[in-house]
Amino acid sequence: MFHTTGFFTFLAAVLAMFYLSPRSWRRVILLAASYFFYMSWNAKFVVLLLVLTATDYIAALWMARVPAGGRRKTWLIVGLCANLGFLGFFKYFNFLAGNVAMLLGRPADAYTLSIILPMGISFHTFQSISYLIDVYRGTQPAIRNPIDYALYIAFFPQLVAGPIVRARDFFANLYAWKAPQPKEQLRGMVLVVFGLAKKLVVADQFAQLADGYFRDPVRHPGSLAAWGGAIAFSLQIFFDFSGYTDMAIGAAQLFGFHFPGNFRRPYLAETITEFWRRWHISLSTWLRDYLYIPLGGNRHGRAATYRNLMLTMALGGLWHGASWNFVVWGGYHGALLSGERALGIGRRKGWQVARVALTFALVTIGWVFFRAASFTQSEYVIGQMFAAPGARVPWPRWQLWAAVILLILAVLEERRNWFERLVESPAWLSAAALGLLLFCIEILAYSGPAVPFVYFQF
Amino acid sequence: VTSFSVVIRLAGAIVIFFGLDGLCFRTGYYRSLLEPESTAGYLANTLTLDQQRPTNGPNEIVAVGDSRIALKPRVANAAGTPYRFFTIAVPGTSPRCWYYMLREDDPTANRYAAIVIPVDTYDDRILEDLRTREVDIHYLTPLLRVGDLFEFAGSYPAWTTRAEAAEAVLFKGLFYRRDLQEFLVNHKRRLTILRDVNHRASGWRHDAVWGSASLAGMTVDWEKRVMQPERKQVAEILFQDQPPPNPEFAEYRRMWFGRIIQRYRGSRTRLIFVRLARGPVVRQGLTTDRTSSVREFARRGEIVLLDEHYFDSLERPELFVDALHMNEQGATEFSEMLAREVTRVLGGERR
C-alpha cells in the first residue's frame, strides 16, 4: 500500500488539497482523505471504525463529566469492552475456537468463522485504549470536537501499522499546528524516500531469502542454512517495519505532525532490555505504561516483576497475531528480559561487540517463532540452528555485501548520526545522496510481485 | 535550510537520478549486457549484430517481421541475385516494434535498397488487438528515447498500459532491474553467453537449421472441421473463422506502417510488403477486401505490394511445422522465391 504508485499519487493529491485549502478546512480534508484511504482497502469496514470512534468519543466525554469513581470506571469499562470486544472477535475468535475444538477433540475448523481482519485494528485499538485510560486517569482532557478525535484514530499515515501515537502527542501537534519549516519538509521527504528504499531495496530482497528457506526448511538442512534463513528474516522484518515507519513519520511530517521515532538501530543493542528500548518503541512504551506498570511493574519484589514481565511480553506477543507461535515468541522475550534482570546483565560493561552479536543471535532465534508457519516448524528450525553446518548459506554474494554495508551504515548512524547531518548538509551533498538513493530504488528494488508489509497483517 | 534550498535539493536529486539512469542505461553499454534470450536482449542483440556487420554496398535488403517470416539470408543470397539479404526479424514483434527497430538499425534511412515487411494478410482483418500488446514495451525498452514518450505511450488505448509505456521511456532502470539483479547474481554465466552470442554473424538465428518436422499427410475436412491426423493446436488456428474487417487494426497499420513510410519518404529505400504463406492448408472462399490500409499505401505509390498469391504454392503441409510456421524446407523455398521476386520488383540490376 505505502510502496505503490497509487499511494504516492494519493499523498501528493492530499498534500496539494491540504495546503491549498483554507486552514479551517484542513482537518476535514485530512479526515476525509484518511477515510478514503481506509475504504480503498475495504469500504465496509469503515463502519467498524466509525462505531469504535463514536464509542470512544462518547465514553471519554462522559468520563470527563462525572467525578472520579464508580461511574467514571463504568464508562472506561464500556469503552474498553467495545475496543477489546471488536479486537477479540476479529483477531482472536478463530484462535480460541480452534483451541476449544482441539480440546473437545473436534476438527480444528469445527467452530471457526470466515473472518477478515480489519486493516490496522490492532494499532487503532491501542490508540483508543490509551486515550480512554488517559482520560480516566485525568492526564488527557476529553476531546470535544468529534472531527479531531476521528482524525486521531484514522490519520492515514499511521492508521495501518502505527506508530502507536499517544493522544497527548497527537493533539499537541493538532492544536498547536504550524506549517512545517523547509527543513522539516525536507526531512519528511527524505524519510519517505529512505523508508521506501528500506522496504523495496532491502526488506523485499531479504524476504526472498527468508521465504526460500522457511517455505521448506527440510530441504536446507544444517545450521548455516538455518541461520542464513533466520538472519534474512531478521533483516527483512526490521527493514520492512522500520521502512514503513519512516514513511509514516515522514508523510505525517509533511502535514506538520511530528511523531516520535519507532526504531533506534535495535540490532546494535547490547542486551534484550536495550533491544526493547530500540525496537517498536511506541508498542514497548505502550505495553510498559498500560500493562506492565498497572500490573505492578517492579514494585512488588522479584517474583512479581518476572511474572509481570512474562505476562506483558506474552500478551505483547499475542497482540502481534493469534497463534501460539506469537505467544511463545513473547514469552521467550519475557524470559530473556527476566533472565537479564536476574543476572544483572544490563549493568555490566565491556565485550561490546560480543554482547551485540549475542543479543542479535538471541533476537534472531526469537524471530523463528515469528516467521515459522507452525510451532513444529519453529522447533525444527531452531534445532537446525544448533546442528552441524550442513549446506552452505543460500545467500547470493551481493546480498552478503549488502548486509555488511547496512551494518556499517547502522554503526555510523549510531556514532555519527549521519541521517540528520545529511538533511542539514550542503545542498549539493543532500541532492546527490537523495538522487543516488532514488537510483538505488530504481535498480535494486525487488522486481517480483509486490511484497506486503509484514506488520500490515497485525 | 530555506524553501529555495529545498527546491534546489529536490531538483538536484532528480537531475542526478536521471543522470545516473542515463549514464547506465541510455549510453548503450548496458544494452550490450542484457540477457540475450530475454525479449529486450534478443531484440537488442539482433540489432547490434546487424549494425556491427561489415557493409555490402548499396544493394542490401533487410527484412523485419516476427517468427512467421521464414527468411534464411544465406539461402536468399545464394539465389543468384545482385542483392544481399539480411534479416532483423524477431519472434513476437509487431509493426509498432518494426518502426523503432528500423529507426535504430538504419538511422539515416538510406542504408538499404529495400525493406521487406511481411504481413499475414493485405486486408485489415485480425483477431488480436495489436494496439494493446504490452510485450512491445519489453521488446522496445532499449530503443526508446525520451522524445518517444507521447508517441509511444499514446499508442496504447488503456491508461494503465500508457503509464507502463511511459515508465519504460523515462525510467530505464525500472525495466532493466530484473535483468540487472540477475546479472549481479550470475554475472560469470551471462558474460560467457554474451561472448559467444556477440561473435555470431548477423542473422545467425535465421540461418540456423529450422525445424525438420512437418505436417505432411495432413488432410482437412472443412465442413466437419476435422483434421487427420489430429493436432489440437494446429486445428485451433486452422478452423478459426475469418475475422471481419477491423477498423482499429486498419488505424493501427496506418499509424505504424505510415511512420515507416514517412521515415523513408524521399529515400532510395523501397518498402516491399509481402503476404506470407497463410498456412499448411487454406480454406477456399475466403473473402478479400478491395480496400485496406496497405492497399491504400500501394495505390499512392508509397509501398510495393508483392502479388498477394505469390507464395500460395508454399501453402503445403510438408512445408510447415505447425499452423503458422514453416520448417527448414519451407524456409528454404520461401527464401529463394522471395529473393527472386524482390529482385524482379527492384529491376534486377545493381543500383
Image (tube, coloured by chain):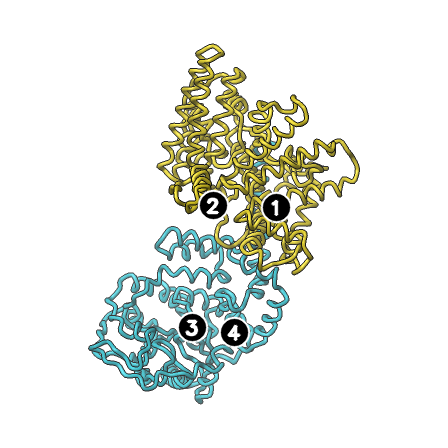
Binning the other alpha carbons within 10 Å of mark 2 as few (below 14), some (14 to 19) or many (20 upward) gives few
Q: Check the image and report above or below for A186 versus A198.
A: above
In the rendered image of the structure, the colour used to display chain A is yellow
Binning the other alpha carbons within 10 Å of mark 1 as few (below 14), some (14 to 19) or many (20 upward) gives many
Which of the 4 quarters of the picture holds residue B214?
bottom left
Disc 2 residue type (three-letter): Thr
Q: Which chain carries label 1?
A: A
Where disc 3 sits, the SS reads loop
Q: Which residue lies furthest to the bottom in this view?
A: B80
Between the residue at mark 1 and the residue at mark 4, the CA separation in whole angstroms equals: 50 Å
In the rendered image, residues at marks 3 and 4 fall on the same chain: yes
Disc 4 residue type (three-letter): Asp
Label 1: which residue? A234
Point 47% across, 45% down: residue? A4
Residue A4: mark? 2
Where disc 4 sits, the SS reads helix
Q: Which of marks 2 and 4 is in front?
A: 2
Point 48% across, 12% down: residue? A69
